[in-house]
Amino acid sequence: MKGHSEEQRWTKIVLWASILGVLVFIIFATSLTMAVWSALGNRSKVIQLPEAFPAAVAWTRLACSSFSLSFSPDGQLLASPTGFGTIGLFRVSDGKLLRTFIGHTGEVTSIAFSPDGQRIASAGFLGGTVKLWRVSDGKLMHALKRRNLFSLLTSAFSLPFPVTAIAFSPDGKLLASADPLGIISLWEVKSGKLKRTLKVGDAVFSLAFSPDSKFVAVGQGNGTISFWQVADGSLVQTFAAHSGIVGVLSFSPDGQLLASGGEDRTVKLWRLSDGHLVQTLIGHQGVRFLCFSPDGNILVSVMGTVKLQRVSDGKEVGAIKRRAVSASLSPDGHLIALGIGPTIELYRVADAKLMRTITGDARFVRCVAFSPDGHLLASAEGSVKLYRSADGQLVRELVAPNDAVLSVAFAPRVPILAAGSRKGIIYLWRVTDGQLVHALKGHNRRVISVSFSLDGRFLVSGSEDNTVKIWNVADRRLMRTLQGHSVVNTVALSPDGKLAAIGHNDGAISLWQVYNGQLVRTLKEQDGGVETVTFSPDGQILASGTENGSLRLWRVADGQLVQTLKEREERRIVSVTFSSDGRFLAALDTEAINIWRVADERLVVTLKGHTVVPSAITFSPDGQLLAFGGLDGILVWRVGKFLR
């Protein structure tokens, strides 16, 4: 019995030690990969708070901002991320989308054409996998993933494990990939087999093969550059290059120079024969892209804006005043493609003339809405996407036939979702199975806002045709049309369904009786167009935000202004939303989300995470989550701890 007890005791010790080890691994893996992702340029997880409260991003669905671009060797095709986990192949001559490659589970961050132009390699933030696609038909040829304990555990626990860099050898035989653990994998392109691994020892952020394919240069997180022999995997040379991450590397066409770009905002030119630093070029931001012109005389860099500098003396010979997050130079050096938000802009290098703009499946999230039970989050991003609120998992996509969705709202008592579209149609989908139930037609321009009454009997839609329409949900009948006196920017329905508030472009807010279509009163803002309005849950207060940054609260009963929370800050207020108990008001402007306690006008918390073109915010029904939508994609914060 004693021996049996001793065996049980040791079994328990081993079990608890294993559990502790797994927990430590999860914390380590998450911290490591989040740090790597932050270094790669993902700013959307930054939250700035005025008080010492720990905040958490519950989950994100980042917009595709063209982190990577790649021209085909003949310059006729351009590959770019086009959406969450997808890659678009565009024809350069007219910008036409030829093919979409679908297969990544997370955002695509690296793309490269093979030297013969027959394959595309792609990698992303999740999974630690490099995918090799055949260009001609889009077929997935190989999924390259190094099998080790770390990769298996990150997959098992759905943790991020990014591929931080990829590069084809110029002879087309090998593909190199790097991971946050400082391991470089050399893969045979033809067979997909792992040929060799190089253990660098520090996180790798950039790779470049020498023109003769004999060496690979590695840019590391500690600011060093190392050179490795491809044939036997031996380390040739290491030298300190930058004071921060080495994010970009490029060999000159003759292989005599290496250009390196770092987070220290410098570009450095190195002579490879003796490792001598030839020149240092200083920019204003971290370096996103580096490339020599085909003749090796010009160095093209993206450091916020695009610069063309003469290699011989560093003199600037051209510039494109556009802030890009990625770039690619055509093989002949005549065109440069810039990734700017969800679009690609093609410029002629000789005179910086914009030749063409290419827009793929841009994930501009225009509207977000929680389901009544808080379990789902719907986003309007061309199609309607339904995400699971708990973890951001995509549950279903609802596609409007030959149309694009701009606004969404859940019905409060039945599983129906309404979506306003670019063509002026309001689509009604059944949430449970994604079935399109009906299409309401009546507007002749874009439907920018939809809202259900609290009892679910009425649906109100606002359009750029300067009308607001009230629909009977049961029989899908148009009850009446309210004609706005100026451009309709926003519309909201009171909780009892009796009033409709319309925000106009001329600064007026009009209140209408839903049942008879009579104008009740007009509230006049003094600070530009009204961008957003919303009723408090009890229907007694109306909040409004303007294009000039004013945030005001109005008493619905008599139209009196009762509070001014912000006044003329010159930051456009895009969206406002009350918490479900009405005690807090969140306001989204072009720089931050501010949450106010209504009773004493106290600013409770400021969330900073979005970087470009914000669009909408909404509280979850229980007040624990706040969702943001915009050109950045979707961010969801846990905010319940602040709302006490």
Image (cartoon, rainbow, N blue to C red):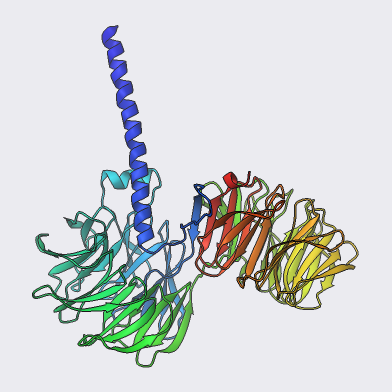
* Residue at the (38%, 52%) spot, across then down: 160
In the rendered image, the vertical position of residue 157 relative to residue 484, given as above or below: above
> From this viewpoint, is residue 124 visible?
no
Task: Indicate the quadrant containing the C terminus: top left, top right, bottom left or bottom right.
Answer: top right
Q: Quadrant of residue 38?
A: bottom left
Q: Is residue 152 left or right of residue 62?
A: left
The x, y position of residue 66, in whole percent, is 42, 70
- The residue lying at 67 percent from left, 57 percent from top is 577
For the question of whether residue 642 can be seen, the reply is: yes
Q: Is residue 644 left or right of residue 50?
A: right
**Nearer to me, 220 or 78:** 220
Residue 245 at x, y percent in the picture: 28, 63
Q: Residue at x 65, y 51 (%)?
A: 371
How many numbered marks does the figure carry?
0
Q: Quadrant of the N terminus?
A: top left
Q: Residue furthest bottom?
A: 351
Residue visible at 71% across and 74% down in the picture: 527
The residue lying toward the viewer, choosing from 342 and 576, is 576
* 16 sits to left or right of 210: right
Horizontal placement of 49 versus 274: left or right?
A: right
Q: Is 86 in front, or is 494?
A: 494
The residue most toward the top is 1
The picture places residue 234, in percent across and down from the top left corner, at: 10, 60
